[in-house]
Amino acid sequence: MSDIVTYYPDRRDRALNAGNLRTEFREEIRKSWEEYVAQVGEELAKKTPYFRAALNEILADGQQLF
């Protein structure tokens, strides 16, 4: 998530303000999920709220959007 914020700060801010963060970063979020699953395993990834929490905390700037 932090890579998205680092590499696309203006795009992220526009999408956050427009309310289309999920749509705007759909592909990046999917790729991040795949990387996360590869690192921690599918079972742990699906059982824990860590990925969703990171989306909300980092990408959505603390808002509960995911």
Image (tube, rainbow, N blue to C red):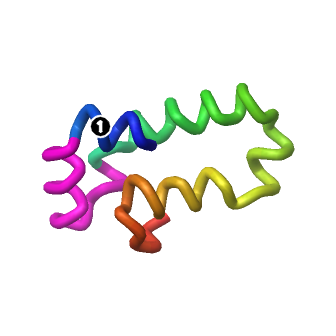
Q: Position of residue 5 (x, y in %)?
A: 31, 43
**x, y percentage for residue 44?**
83, 46
In the image, residue 44 sits, relative to residue 50, either above or below, namely: above
Question: Is residue 20 inside the magenta stretch?
Answer: yes
Location of residue 15 by image quarter: bottom left
Left or right of residue 64: residue 38: right
**Could you say where residue 52 lies in the image, as x and y percent from the top left?**
58, 58
| Secondary structure beneath label 1 | helix
Residue at far bottom of view: 64
**Residue at 79%, 38% in the rendered image:** 42
**Apparent side of residue 17 relative to residue 25 in the rendered image (left or right):** left
Residue of label 1: 6
Q: Residue at the location (26% across, 32% down)?
A: 7
Q: Nearer the viewer, residue 37 or 3?
A: 3
Circle 1 crowding by C-alpha within 10 Å: few under 14, some 14–19, many from 20? few
- Name the one closer to the observer, 46 or 54: 54
- The answer to whether residue 13 is magenta is yes
Residue reaching furthest right?
43
Amino acid type of the residue tagged 1 in the rendering: Thr
Q: Which residues are magenta?
A: 9-23
Q: Is residue 39 above or below residue 20?
A: above
66 versus 39 height, above or below: below
- Where in the figure is residue 32, as x and y percent of width and height? 52, 34
Q: Quadrant of residue 49?
A: bottom right
Q: Is residue 21 left or right of residue 45?
A: left
How many circles with numbers are drawn on the protein? 1
Res 60 quadrant in image: bottom left
Q: Quadrant of the N terminus?
A: top left
Q: Main secondary structure of the magenta part?
A: helix
Q: Residue at x 21, y 44 (%)?
A: 9
